Image (cartoon, rainbow, N blue to C red):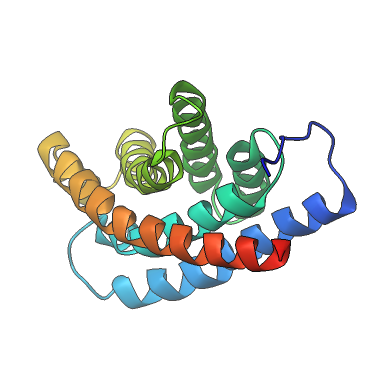
Amino acid sequence: MKREKQSKMRTKDITQIAMTVSAMLVGGFLIYMISSRFPLPGFKYAAMSPYLSFIVAMLLINFNLKRSVLIVNTVFAMVMSMVSIYMGLAIFSTGVLTQITQTMIPKGWRYKNTVVSALYSVYTVGTALTVSKLFIAKEIFEIITWPYVLALMTIAFVLGLVGAYAGDLLGNRVFRSRQN
């Protein structure tokens, strides 16, 4: 049985958005704090890749609404803008890029959710470092070169694939068990 995407939000959808944003906040904060011990600039974003891709994969499987990634990232960006407007800008940009990618990939492709979820992590690294490099004038961002950003984005893609694959496996099992 194929589920059609809905265009109106229900209470269940709003709850799913809130739970997803909460999971991104709490899990992302914990990973961010642990990975901030590493001296490489931007490494913390790549270290969050498996977790973020896992969350996005679960979202894409279980959330029955068009533009789900963009909706969740808009709420997440509004929350994180209270901490830093630049962080909010990077998060919103990540959501826009991911949503564009999701609409460009054909619907029937088997690995669509996995690739979109992994690319979410790539966009997270790319937008966070780009926004930091362009808008925050600190010496640390002067040493970040574009090849370094591309290398971190590649690492984020590989780690994101692992998280996305795990999210697809678990999400499909949970969704199938709900149907039975």
- Report the residue at 71% width, 39% height from top: 65
Q: Is residue 51 visible?
A: yes
Is residue 142 found left or right of 95 in the rendered image? Answer: left
Q: Report the front residue among 143 and 146.
A: 146
The percent position of residue 117, horizontal first and vertical second, equals: 43, 47
Q: Quadrant of the N terminus?
A: top right
Compared with 4, 64 (above or below) is: below
Quadrant of the rendered image containing residue 74: top right
- Report the residue at 29% width, 39% height from top: 133
Is residue 110 found left or right of 75 in the rendered image? Answer: left
Compared with 33, 81 (above or below) is: above
Is residue 144 found left or right of 13 in the rendered image? Answer: left
Q: Report the front residue among 82 and 175.
A: 175
The percent position of residue 135, horizontal first and vertical second, equals: 38, 36
The percent position of residue 70, horizontal first and vertical second, equals: 61, 37
Total residue callouts: 0
Quadrant of the rendered image containing residue 16: bottom right
Q: Quadrant of the C terminus?
A: bottom right
The percent position of residue 93, horizontal first and vertical second, equals: 49, 34
- Report the residue at 78% width, 35% height from top: 6
Compared with 102, 175 (above or below) is: below
Q: Is residue 142 visible?
A: no
